[in-house]
Each structure stands twice: as C-alpha cells, then as structure tokens.
Amino acid sequence: FNKSGIFVERTLALIKPDAVHKANEIETILLNQGFTVLQKRRVILTAEQCSDFYSEHYGKKFFPSLVAFMTSGPIVAMVLAKENAVHQWRELIGPTNSTVAKETHSESIRALYGTNEQKNAVHGSDSEVSAEREIRFFFPNCIVEPIPMGQPAKDY
Ligand code: RTP
Ligand code: MG
C-alpha cells in the first residue's frame, strides 16, 4: 500500500552471485526507476533450497548447472513494490539471456551486469502468483495482508 492507502503490487528480485558485488549500483537503478525496497536479505542458498525455489525447471538440461551457479555464493533477495511491479521489474531486467539483452535491450540490468544465458545478474518473478510464493520463500514472516484497522502491527 502506498502513502494514500492504495495497493501497490510487489515482486521478488534476486541479485545473483555473479552480480552481488554490484548490488549497490543495481539498487540505485531500481530506486531511480520508482521501485521501493520493502525487504532485503543477503543469503547463501543450499542446493536443496535452490532446487525448491527453481522447482519449475527440475529435470531440464540446465538445472544442475543452474543450482551450482545459484549456490556458488551469496545472493541478495529483495521485495520490491511499484505499480505493476511484476511486469515492470521484468521489463527493467531484460531478456533471460544477457548476450541477447546486450543486443536488444542495452539499457537493461541483464545487459549491463550479466554475462550469458546463465550468469544473468538478476531474477524477477514471472507472475503475481509466483511473486507471492517467492516472497514467502525468502521472507516467511513478511506481512502479506493489510494490517486490520485498530490492531497493532507485529511479527513482521
Ligand atoms: P529467472 O527465473 O532467474 O528470473 O530467469 P527467467 O525467468 O528469465 O528464465 P527461466 O527460464 O526461469 O530460467 C531460470 C534461470 O536459469 C538459467 N538458465 N540457464 N539454457 C540455459 O543454460 C539456461 N536457461 C536458463 C538462467 O540463470 C535463468 O535466469
Ligand atoms: Mg523464471
């Protein structure tokens, strides 16, 4: 909810291990694009946690390599808020393959900070349903419902 009490969509962003050293620059870009950072954590995923997070890709050829990459170092998880946040964040990060991004979306975050099909600097939820699941995955205590009027805000 924004200052006027109007619902603002949320999405989950990850800064992947290849771009964690550029986390401050990436955060500056997203703030300049009107996103608000509601939550932020630096984490190192276990292979099990990573497999769960990317379970939609289980069985694909690139899955073992993806898990190895995503567990190779710390990542930064952020809950971002903005109007139409899921779509807007996907637009800002650009195409999955950073090589393609450099050719077609040269201002995108994946063009600027990614390297190839796998090392692509950032993640963004692909739908509102994914966003809610992924936010809960990284921020299980984060409030998802508005706080009822007259009740104290607690436990988030
Ligand atoms: P993400 O979930 O990380 O935001 O990326 P995405 O939606 O744009 O792409 P997705 O298809 O969900 O793929 C997840 C991540 O797996 C790696 N990948 N490697 N052929 C390959 O080697 C390949 N394809 C995808 C990338 O790191 C991609 O972001
Ligand atoms: Mg995806």
Image (cartoon, rainbow, N blue to C red):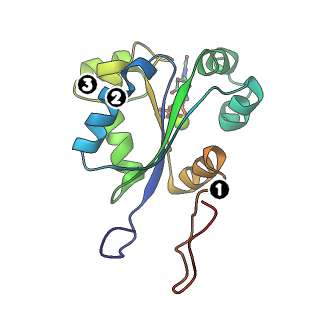
Per the image, the residue denoted by label 1 is 141
Query: Which sits earlier in the primary sequence, circle 3 or circle 1?
Result: 3
* Residue 69 appears left or right of 46: left
* SS type, badge 3: helix
The residue lying at 73 percent from left, 33 percent from top is 49
Asked if 2 appears above or below 66 in the picture, the reply is: below
The residue lying at 40 percent from left, 12 percent from top is 115
* Image position, residue 42 (x, y; %): 54, 32
The answer to whether mark 2 and mark 3 are in CB contact below 8 A is: no
* Image position, residue 75 (x, y; %): 54, 27
The residue lying at 60 percent from left, 46 percent from top is 134
* Structural distance between the alpha carbons of marks 3 and 1: 39 Å
* Image position, residue 85 (x, y; %): 38, 53
Query: In the rendered image, which quarter is residue 60 located in?
Result: top right
Per the image, the residue denoted by label 2 is 24
Give the crowd class for mark 1: few <14, some 14-19, many >=20 residues within 10 Å. few
Q: Give the mark toward the camera: 2 or 3.
A: 2
The amino acid sitting under disc 3 is Thr
Per the image, the residue denoted by label 3 is 104
The amino acid sitting under disc 1 is Asn
Query: Which sits earlier in the primary sequence, circle 2 or circle 1?
Result: 2
* Structural distance between the alpha carbons of marks 2 and 3: 25 Å
**Does label 1 point to a residue whose CB lies under 8 Å from ligand 1?**
no
* Residue 45 appears left or right of 152: right
